[in-house]
Image: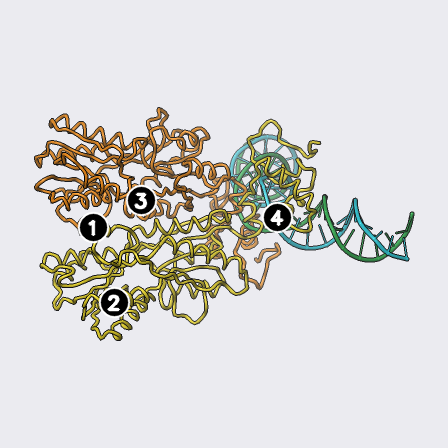
Chain colours: A orange, B yellow, C green, D cyan
Amino acid sequence: MAGDIREKEGTARTRPTLRTLAADTGFAVATVSRALAKDPKIAESTRQIVAEAAERLGYVPDRAAQRLRTGRTKVISLILDPHQEILGFTNELLAGLTGALAGTGYHLTVFPQVAGADSLAPVLHVVRNNLADGLIFSRTREDDSRVRFLLDRGVPFACHGRTTLSTRHPFVDFDNRDFAYNAAIRLADLGARSLCIILPPAEYTFAGHLHAGVHRAAEERGLSVTIPDRLSIDSPPETVRAWAEGLADVPDGFIFPGELTFLAATAGLKPRGLLRGRDYNAVVKVSSSLLGLIDPEVDCIYEDIQEAGRLLGDTLLKALAAEGGPGPEGVIYPPGVLTVK
Amino acid sequence: MAGDIREKEGTARTRPTLRTLAADTGFAVATVSRALAKDPKIAESTRQIVAEAAERLGYVPDRAAQRLRTGRTKVISLILDPHQEILGFTNELLAGLTGALAGTGYHLTVFPQVAGADSLAPVLHVVRNNLADGLIFSRTREDDSRVRFLLDRGVPFACHGRTTLSTRHPFVDFDNRDFAYNAAIRLADLGARSLCIILPPAEYTFAGHLHAGVHRAAEERGLSVTIPDRLSIDSPPETVRAWAEGLADVPDGFIFPGELTFLAATAGLKPRGLLRGRDYNAVVKVSSSLLGLIDPEVDCIYEDIQEAGRLLGDTLLKALAAEGGPGPEGVIYPPGVLTVK
DNA sequence: GAGAGATTTTGTAACGATTTAAAAAGCCAT
DNA sequence: ATGGCTTTTTAAATCGTTACAAAATCTCTC
């Protein structure tokens, strides 16, 4: 009954391995391995016996050994960029990501993107040292060196935001065009004639999308649009506030693609006696319920970052499963209406 | 000159291994391995030759092989809890952590703490499956099952916050007592006679610290202290606001250990016509510059979460290096003055 | 120039999984 | 039984690294 292969008896402290299972069931190690892999070449009865033993002994395959043998790491790397324009972004994204990865056997490692450094550096590091099977990153550019590199090397990835490259690749993106369009329409409905929107730095693809959305609405409704130069959603709040304090010809409609920018601008406008609802209106893209506490009256449109995380995880998993075949489609998730009254 | 061991010529695509270096230098694989490990038993001249070859060929050791052989994963796991009381907490903590870990060869993996589930579960998972060499977690309790378990198993860790267990263990904690004391003194200086502080749930150690700090100041200055029952810094903002709206005998001094709680309470008090500076004063513990935009006048004391992350990383690294010997001391980092006027 | 002792290098065996090719077993008709 | 199938199991090699014990080389001293 008992296996005849040498067993480390007494010391029940060692984790069970395939050898332990082999000894327990009487099958060879190879048989056990394939049985656990549900290989149809192994008799159903054998598979059941092995599965039972694995369960009973609490067998868990050794990741290091699997990784060494197969070359697959079962790891997904998230490149974390230091941008802070969205409060709680990291937390929400991670919640979504870990949710999507739960139960798949994939682990999530985090690599930082150093502030001033080349955005390709962490990606290069992960790929060169074979640290993960797939990557996730955000802040995608129109012509993104990371996307180019990964496509070239055939490394699976999913990015938050799109490129304008012709090659199809997996991505997850918020419908910023739709957001901007609806924000502008809303402002027009409130009587605005001249709009102002603070955009992300021009190299990011979603800058163009926001721009396009506003312009479409502006054309439809005959509005003017100002886009502040030398200012972006990445500008430090003090800069934004100073800008608002000195702003001449104050527009009567503002679109803020981020809570922080809105707060900073408001901090600059309020001391001038300019009141929202009377002198101007605003629509803000939010990803938290923060503004509901500060300024319950402001029009908000919601971007669900946790959902983005989930989608990024799912998309990357699909890409990993595709294995040479055509990868998954890009996914665009829509704005959620939070408090547009 | 060239090595005589079979070399995969032509295909320069494969990553160099110890074998590659052995072939290149003419030494045995074992020698190369120990040379790279700076083993003093290997001649200095040999070490130099090997180091040069490794550099030239771009050799990077294979983590899977190292891990399989040594049993060490070179991974640190962060258990991410879903609490959101501190805006940007996750982002700051990760920035600090990855900074501390950079260049050490340790990677950071993230495991989620599912909202309602047992806090021991993810720790158990990591330890049982040997997924990391050390753990980091936050929200430490007075009697923390995770700390007990890890101490018992001898697994290195560093936690954010202290326990009240008698066994010494590594931790990193903010000086909440000092914060609360100084906040209360500040309020007394502003003329407050009756204080109110919203605490974390009682099981967390820092609830006691905050409590102690306030009480010491209250005794010194002869103040009264109210601690709202059925309310904590984890209460949903709407609950806090509702509480503030219905509050009878409004105290003249508030201490808020979190930005969100402050905003929620303010949202409840303001509609009642209660004005800060006239009817009451407040001191808030902040971890971002958010309040500077919303309410530049409010007294803030700063907790540097990024620093906490750095310290957690450093402390855990020391614990890992201690290897059986006495682990590192706990670290308490002080409040930073941000905008106490 | 032989032997002792220290220094330096090396061959081999793991670590725990997967995979290839080959062996063993089962089945059936002749 | 025997040969010819198919189904099932197995032995052995491999991934890249480290550790143990033994071999090789060098350095002195007499």
Marks 4 and 3 belong to one chain: no
Which quarter of the rendered picture does the C terminus of chain B lie within?
bottom left
**For the residue marked with disc 1, what is the amino acid?**
Ile
User: Is disc 3 placed on a helix, strand or loop?
Assistant: loop
**Residue hosting label 2:** B184
The residue to which callout 3 is attached is A84
The chain letter under disc 3 is A
Secondary element type, mark 1 = helix
- Count of labels in the image: 4
Give the mark nearest the N terminus, 2 or 1: 2
Q: Is residue B128 above or below residue B182?
A: above
Frontmost residue, B332 versus A120: B332
Q: Which residue corresponds to the image point at 10% horizontal and 34% vertical from the top-left?
A: A192
Instruction: Sort mark 3 into few (<14), some (14-19) or many (20+) by Cα contacts within 10 Å.
Output: some
User: Which residue is located at x 44 percent, y 54 percent?
Assistant: B313
Find numbered disc 4 in the image and state the secondary structure of the residue it sits on. Answer: loop
Instruction: Write down the chain letter for disc 1.
Output: B
Q: Which residue is mark 4?
A: B37
Q: What residue do we see at 47% from left, 45% from top? A: A44
User: Percent from the top left, x then y, of residue B272?
Assistant: 9, 59
Looking at numbered disc 4 in the image, what kind of residue is underneath it?
Ala
- Nearest the viewer among B101 and A193 is A193
Instruction: Point out the tag, 1 or 4, that comes first from the N-terminus.
Output: 4
**What residue sits right under mark 1 in the picture?**
B294
Q: CA distance from mark 2 to mark 1?
A: 23 Å
